[in-house]
Image (cartoon, coloured by chain):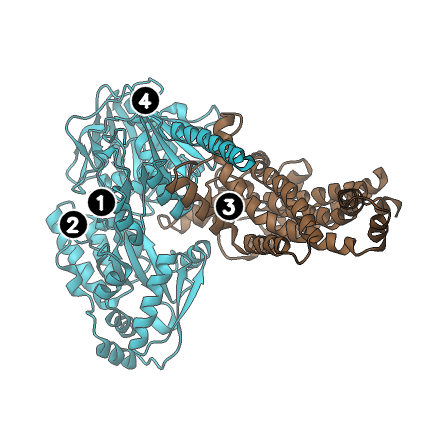
Chain colours: A brown, B cyan
Amino acid sequence: MLRFALARLAMAIPTLLLVAVTVFVLIRLIPGDPAAMMLGDASDAQGLAALRERLGLDRSIPEQFLIWASLLLQGDLGKSIVSGQDVLPTILDRFSVSVQIVIPAVLLATLVAVPMGMFAAWKQNSLRDISLVSCATLMLSIPAFWMGMLLLLLFGLKLRWLPVVGYVNFSEDPKAAFVYLILPVATLFLHEVGVILRMARASTLEVLNLEYITHARAKGLPESAVMWRHAFRNAFGPTWTLLGLILGNLLAGVAIIETVFTIPGLGRLLVDAIFARDYPVIQGCLLFIASIYILVNLVVDLLYPIFDPRIAAQ
Amino acid sequence: MQTIKQLSVLAILLGTAASATSSLANEAGTLRVAIHSDIASLNPGVNRDANSDMVLAHVVEGLVGFGDDLTVKPMLADSWTTNDDATVYEFKLRDGVKFHDGKPLTAEDVVWNFNRYLEPATTFQCVGRYDGQVGPKLAKIEAVDAGTVRFSFDAPAPNFLITLATIQCTPWILSRSSVDENGAFAKPVGTGPFAFDTQQSGRFLDLVRFKEYAALPGKPDGYVGNKTANLERVRFMVVPDASTRSNGLQSGEIDVIDEVEPSVIESLRTSKMTVDIQPTPAWMTLQLQTTAPALSDPKMRRAIAHAIDLTQLSAALGGGLYTPNPSVLAKDTYYYDNSAAAWPAYDVELARKLAGEAGYKGEEISVLVANRQNRVQVATIIQAMLSQAGIKIRLDVRDWATQLDQYRAGKYELAVFAYSARLDPLLSYQSYIGDKKAEPTRMWDDARATELLAKVSTLRQPEERKKVFSELNAEMGKQVPILGLFNIPSVTALSPGVKDFAGWQGGTNRFWGVTKVAD
């Protein structure tokens, strides 16, 4: 197990190196100049040249890359061109905010969707199955930003139960922080529950048709034992893999939800940095996101044998 | 029974949530102002945008500033004198002015500030206006005594006061404690009615009332006058989404939003919000790149101007909010003298004729435009209007960073571009006239224009300046290196509890003098 984990981590190094080089080059190939963005319409060529020099943008791209790479090897992602703040602490700060939305939403969605998906599979083609599948399809079809706006209008503007704007950190005021997270978590939950439910249903259906389930039933086991003891562990495997992908994707930032709910998460940091051509922040964010993807999927793979012992044997 | 229990739990939970929400929404004495993006920096004149200009104006002050009538008036200066050829200015500083760190304002502080702004390492955006690149060079700054500062130029500088007051370029006077021991900027410590308190990236920036603020007598007046703060705290909240800003205002979680879209003004008014609409000289334009082969002939540029119905364009954008204006000189300002009449009037047939005379044979001309809803709307209407005159247009929709990059390089044919409010026409003409080879952002590279600009730069009397500005306007109307579309108003919506707010032509919102009562 340890060897497997270390081998996977070692394999991640060339991936991250490739990401670093690709991101560094690509972001400089697209038009736009961070210095020009900072100056707007109120400066001239000399002012622009002076600012480019101060920011080190007048150096050649290989030279800029070497400076960035040498800092990176020291664990330093550089400073934001726009704000002057260190990139790594900024990313970690924003990531901690995204985590507060993503983890509860995905956890809740899993706890609700997996049993429901299994139930729908167990009651295949019944009215309850059709109702659940229809709801799931509807949920995943509604764009998350629109769902968020609907929830804001209903619970924020009409009923005035929940806040419309802002974010409070748990360290400042846990009660307020909880209140402010209800709507974004609910939005993400409603979106992801549909995806997970459909996967759980499909994989359960596949398992329920296998011979060992028929055998369990023939032994006279009650349906609950058949479902939870025999069907669940095999059916949950594909859903677990999907959860890894969903988590990796969402932890990379849910920019639209963060924008609609005014949450200072990683997604918004990245989008703002792209619009401002804040190269160090873009590079840092994308490298961090790639690392998160790799780590989350490694954890998912390492935990897979808990649900499917055949994987460990292999 | 179980369902009733579950519903009760949900109701209790949401009840708790509602009470927490309302306690957050009612922070007494705090004005909550929505801003579109984070304040990147509060280092004056270095990394600035409209948001940072607005915040800084509450914290720091200049020697002079623009009043509501767009004349330059004293702020930290009590008075000034100048010699006959306007090469030497002496400012007497106001007594009793203190920085937020408790130190008194002295002439030495002013000298330190100007030396810092002129230092290349500071990268002050407007250093060119003081080091001889644009206009005369500021040769010497000296403290005559503790309350008097003298500025000496190498040539007459009749417009020095205007340069000092320019919102985008004001050399704000900071306390020396604004920089750290290495001279690096730390935070703005000024003399303004509010002091910088705290900033949380991506969330908010707080200013608190400066209790020892030395207010001028009288009423608020532009960026000068009585700037007494009535609020204990102003919180600038980062709310990037327009609909969230509007919802937040209506739910009582935000007190002020700006850049309100015309489409939501009526619904906000119906919800008992106050909507303040203030005309400003900010200018939406169609830039015509005179070096582009398709547009090098003035006849072709005039044809384009004749083909665009500015009145219809402004009306189509909504709500009678926009004032059509082809001229640099904004309506309702002293220097406007029926200036629009000097520009090509809407005449499709004449447009066709002129285009033909210019040798136009139906080639496609591109319009560069940023992917912002209202600007794409403007470009689309222009495309339709020009097609009526037989001029084929292709929209080139890019993100703002790309448009700015191409603007800086002069690489476009036509472009929809908005200029922030310049409160004196000289500042505008200085932005447009010049050598395109040296400065590709200049729109009008013409000997006569350069001559007139040089002439007006030496004038001090408004009536003399008005004559030259009118000449410049008439000449610009003939050559059409840029076509004004409309002046952009400042539209601000306020919750019913916000009182005594007034917009002004500067366009940047001011919250001194503003009070907030419980809704």
> Is the residue under label 4 in contact with that under label 2 (CB below 8 Å)?
no
- Asked whether B236 or A281 is in front, the reply is B236
Q: Are marks 1 and 4 on the same chain?
A: yes
- Check disc 3 and give the amino acid type: Ile
Q: Are marks 4 and 3 on the same chain?
A: no
- Check disc 4 and give the amino acid type: Phe
Q: Are marks 2 and 3 on the same chain?
A: no
- Asked whether A78 or A185 is in front, the reply is A185
Mark carried by residue B99: 4
**Labels 2 and 4: the sequence-earlier one:** 4
Which class describes the residues within 10 Å of circle 2: few (<14), some (14-19), or many (20+)? some
Q: Which residue is mark 2?
A: B333
Q: Which of the two marks, 3 or 1, is nearer to us in this view?
A: 3
* Extreme residue in the left direction: B463
Mark carried by residue A257: 3
Mark carried by residue B505: 1
Residue B229, visible in the rendered structure: yes
In the picture, measured across the screen, residue A70 lies left or right of residue B364, that is right
Among the 4 quarters of the image, the one containing residue B185: top left
> Is the residue under label 2 in contact with that under label 1 (CB below 8 Å)?
yes
